Amino acid sequence: MDDGESTRYERARICIDFGTALSKASICLDPLMPLEVGVKPLPIGAVARAEHPLLTPSVLYVDQGRMYFGPAALDHARRGVDSARDPLLSFKTVLGATDPQAALAQKLRPSMDPTGTFKARDALVLYLAYLDQLIREAIDLAPNIPNIVANARRRYTSPVWRPGSGADKTFEAIFNEAAAVSERLGKLFIAPEGISIAQCKDALDRAAAQPGNGRLETGIFEPHAAAATALAFTNAPTRYVMVFDMGAGTVDIAAFEFDESTEPPALSEVKEARQCSALAGDEIDRILAELYMRKRGGEKSRDDELKLKRTIILAIRDLKRELFTTGKCSLKTGWMATTIRANDLMEDPNFRTYLTALRETVAASLQRVLARAEATNADVVDVVLAGGGSRLPFMVDLVVQLRVGPLSPANPLYSSVDASLRDAFPQIAMSIGGALVEMMPAQ
């Protein structure tokens, strides 16, 4: 492509959201373009052969000398329950670690990598190279997206607040090594037969010695990205936006004040409202799994117990979705099928305690935002529900009971959201906002 075309897209950037359960990616071709033209979620799930075209499981699995990624990794993990093996299910703990260097240096547990080959850093580099290949293939297949933007600057959403812009040197090095690994192994990453450990190790060693250019621009605080998305897509922006981001690993609550009088508009944090809680999707999964174990009952050996727990862990997110969609879920292990109904969960003492704690956590942040809004004579606080947990019915009930503003980007106020995206919009909001955001925190 000629230099003129390169110049036309010099402001393009791609943002990756490493979700605890699902990864997403979006591209902003140019922040000055109309929103419906310039910002697009990328169909990395379709390339990965995942259930949803915009979402791919954040999973890596080592099996019989080969490394598998995404849906293929999940399939192998489910087949490997009998061999006491575990998949690597998330990279969020590394991204949010207080000491990233120490977290990255840890060896993967033997149940994840029985060969003892890989550290957490290796796994993150390989997974990022896998996402790079999904992104490149998605751009190649997508209409109206020029192939040249596959080399656009990269951003990633972070569960940790990093003020201002600029790439963290630790993650910049990881992106650079991932770029070299992606170039070396190419489309092997999206082949269903996986990649040999020897090939992975060779590519990692070569990348460490001669890294590529990952073009990392910055990390974006996840609630900041979600708030930017909500304000970009709404026809009625409010001065205060409170983000309630329920992922699998954490619930992140943050609030922002929007000032349109500056150029670019400022989106500064109401710092006293920020909370990070473990009352997230994984905690619901744990409660549901314990309820299942109690309801199933029966005498089991220790090996049977561990096998059952692994089976439940790998199935629990699908069971949870089925429960909240249809009102019941069922899992068959051996000859026995056990069914749990929505009322079983709602009446469970552990779940009731969880809901009470979650309600109190939301209320504590909201009171601080309302105090700020009242002091500045603002009459509405817009509550944005984001993340995979935002669609759980009790989440909407929690916010409704607080009697605050529009509920989510699926609200009719967000009329510029493509109808085909609305179901997934709360989950892809962070990657969209991370690619779009120009509203950096006010100094």
Image (cartoon, grey):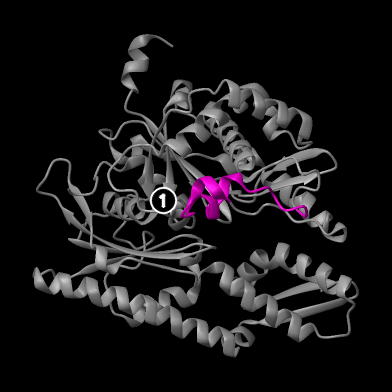
User: In front here: 198 or 143?
Assistant: 198
Specify the amino acid type for callout 1.
Met
Question: Which secondary structure, mark 1?
Answer: helix
Q: Is residue 217 magenta?
A: no
User: Which quadrant of the figure contains the N terminus?
Assistant: top left
Q: Is residue 299 left or right of residue 318?
A: right
**Numbered marks: total:** 1
- Give the image location of residue 100, x and y in percent: 50, 48
Mark 1 Cα-neighbour bin, 10 Å: few <14, some 14–19, many ≥20? many
Residues shaded magenta:
91-111
In the image, residue 8 sits, relative to residue 44, either above or below, namely above
Give the image quarter of residue 425.
bottom left
Farthest residue, direction top? 2
Residue identifier under label 1:
430
User: In front here: 293 or 337?
Assistant: 293
- Give the image location of residue 377, x and y in percent: 8, 70
Identify the residue shown where x is 30% and y is 73%. Answer: 365
Give the image quarter of residue 303.
bottom right
- Give the image location of residue 370, x and y in percent: 20, 74
In the image, residue 246 sits, relative to residue 359, either above or below, namely above
Q: Is residue 394 left or right of residue 242?
A: right
In the image, residue 425 sits, relative to residue 115, either above or below, namely below
Residue 19, visible in the rendered structure: yes
Residue 347, visible in the rendered structure: no
Q: Is residue 232 left or right of residue 348?
A: left
- Give the image location of residue 361, x and y in percent: 38, 77
Q: Is residue 110 magenta?
A: yes
Identify the residue shown where x is 55% and y is 48%. Answer: 102
User: In front here: 149 or 205?
Assistant: 205
Q: Is residue 438 left or right of residue 390?
A: left
Give the image quarter of residue 15.
top left
